[in-house]
């Protein structure tokens, strides 16, 4: 079964993304995500959060979870060039936009 990690400091955003049928792990920040020790298939991460975030978090996640696909979720105008090659899911988004990534796992 696919294991999905959701990293976002906004509880409302975490709740929206958790309404999925996959196994998931929810984190309030990057430090919590890096403490988790299970392999992940897909990671949705907010770009701006307190503590480690942005490109620093992407690099740390890529090292810790090398097989996981990382999707950056942000209201900023980012491209995959800004995010270390990770695709960007633009906030606000519709649930069907999440399904694009979920179908891949």
Image (cartoon, rainbow, N blue to C red):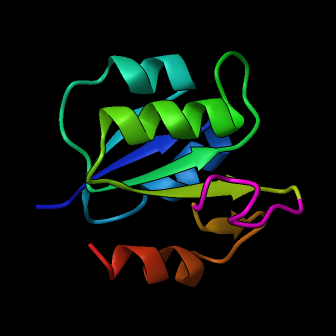
Q: How far from the left and from the top, in percent, is residue 77?
A: 89, 63
Q: Is residue 22 left or right of residue 33?
A: left
User: Is residue 89 in view?
Assistant: yes
- Residue at image position (32%, 79%) is 104
Choose between 33 and 61: the one closer to the eye: 61
Q: Quadrant of residue 53?
A: top right
- Residue 79 on the magenta segment: yes
- Residue at image position (44%, 19%) is 32
Choose between 102 and 87: the one closer to the eye: 87
Which quadrant is home to the N terminus?
bottom left
Compared to residue 104, the image places residue 8 above or below, namely: above
Q: In which quarter of the image is residue 50?
A: top right
Q: Quadrant of residue 61?
A: top left
Magenta stretch, main secondary structure, is loop
What range is drawn magenta here? Answer: 77-85
Number of numbered discs present?
Answer: 0
Compared to residue 82, the image places residue 105 above or below, namely: below
Compared to residue 26, the image places residue 86 above or below, namely: below
Q: How far from the left and from the top, in percent, is residue 100?
A: 47, 83
Q: How far from the left and from the top, in percent, is residue 10?
A: 69, 36
Which quadrant is home to the C terminus?
bottom left
- Residue 63 on the magenta segment: no
């Amino acid at each position: 079964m696919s294991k999905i990690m959701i990293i976002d400091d906004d509880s409302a955003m975490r709740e929206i993304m958790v309404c999925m049928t996959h196994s998931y792990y929810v984190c309030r920040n990057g430090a919590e995500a890096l403490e988790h020790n299970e392999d992940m298939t897909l990671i949705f991460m907010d770009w701006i959060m307190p503590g480690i975030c942005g490109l620093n978090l992407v690099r740390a996640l890529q090292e810790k979870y090398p097989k996981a696909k990382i999707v950056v979720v942000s209201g900023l105008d980012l491209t995959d060039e800004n995010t270390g090659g990770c695709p960007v899911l633009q906030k606000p988004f519709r649930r069907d936009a999440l399904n694009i990534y979920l179908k891949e796992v």
